[in-house]
Image (cartoon, grey):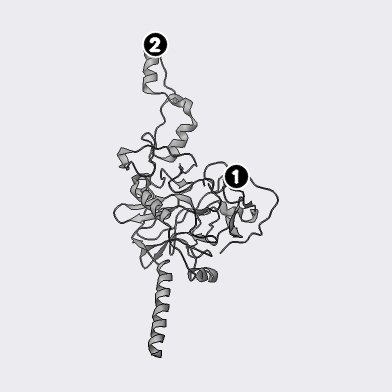
Amino acid sequence: MKKIKILIAILAMLIVSATTYAQVSVEVTASIAPPPLVVYSQPPCPEDGYIWTPGYWAYDSVDGYYWVPGVWVAPPEPDYYWTPCYWGFNDGVYGFYPGYWGPSIGFYGGVDYGYGYGGYGYSGGRWEGGHFRYNTAVTNVNRGRVHNTYVDRSVANTRQMRTRTSFNGPGGITRAPRAEERAAMNQSHTSFTHEQESHQQTARQNRNQLASVNHGRPAIASMNKVGGSRFNSQGHSAVAQSHPGAGSHPHTMNAAPQHMSTPHAQTHMQSHPQQHMTQSHAQTQMRAAPQQHIQSHPQQQHVQMQSHPQPQMHSAPQAAPHMESHPAGGGMEHGGGGGMEHGEGGGGEHHR
């Protein structure tokens, strides 16, 4: 009888162990490397208590890689942090390790996602007394709704991506888990919430999120919350319009308008409205003044859409290019909390 109890106890331990590691084990494999990370502007946090979950490349065996927008999410429990997803290269394949919720930040491959996720820990905020406080030196918040804030400028460099490399392993980021990250992996976890699962599935159904279609520039780079406002990589609102040529579905995330092939083109066209002349307007001018010779001028022509080369996918591991630093306000910066507050200092600690 005693031996039976011991066996039952051992089996129970094995089951618990298997459950714990199943949450951080490889979920999907691919034979080619994920594209470099998308650079985007973080939308402001819409509600107190929401946690930022960075955007990432997911993989579909039929269509390949697709971008899941970064989004603010309500955690499943107070005092829980998000450990981001990441790709790891091992034994000739790229494996996807899903993210999870837990009391500490675990290992996420050393991938620099920006906005507090600089490759280790999280510096975008911390839980205090059941309330989440946001570090506005790193995090963008809606100040009309979010009031629990502090400023810790010592970690402000984590607002920018220092590298766009999106996977861990040979040819990518070569960093092993630290002791505290290993300890966090052994804590109780909660996997994706239903909102997060729905968010990923919606991205999967939108062909404009496919790397093979957007060439590394997805129409929707980030969102303020699941099912909420959508933003392109420059932080501008993604216009709701399907794109029949790309095969988008009317019930999926917003696709890029038909006259825009990339968010870059959208920004360029919006910033110079005076340079665009519609065909009907040009014809009206010509009819009104038939004797007038209209000269072609570069600034009066339609903006030509330049094709962007498809990001290189390698069957062998290859490091992604380093991210160049950009001045504030250039639309390529990670972070920007809408102004630096004065007063509190944070102590510069990362939350595990």
- Image coordinates for residue 312, horizontal then vertical, percent: 38, 52
- Image coordinates for residue 20, horizontal then vertical, percent: 43, 70
What amino acid is at disc 2? Answer: Ala
Quarter of the image with the N terminus is: bottom left
Q: Please say whether residue 158 is visible from this viewpoint.
A: yes
Query: Is 256 situated above or below 349?
Result: above
Q: Is residue 326 left or right of residue 194?
A: right
Q: Is residue 176 left or right of residue 241?
A: right
Q: Kindly identify which numbered label has been placed on residue 68.
A: none
- Image coordinates for residue 111, horizontal then vertical, percent: 49, 59
- Image coordinates for residue 66, horizontal then vertical, percent: 37, 51
**Extreme residue in the front direction:** 1
Query: Of 156 and 299, which appears nearest the observer?
Result: 156
Element type at mark 2: helix
Q: Earlier along the polypeptide chain: callout 1 or callout 2?
A: 1
Query: Of 69 and 31, which appears nearest the observer?
Result: 69
Residue at mark 2: 288
Q: Is residue 35 left or right of residue 162?
A: left
Label 2 Cα crowd, 10 Å radius (few <14 / some 14-19 / many 20+): few
Say which quarter of the image contains residue 280. Answer: top left
Element type at mark 1: loop
What amino acid is at disc 1? Answer: Arg
Residue at 41% across, 56% down: 194
Residue at mark 1: 143
**Extreme residue in the left direction:** 62
Residue at 43% across, 59% down: 192
Q: Nearer the viewer, mark 1 or mark 2?
A: 1
Residue at 64% across, 59% down: 348
**Extreme residue in the right direction:** 343
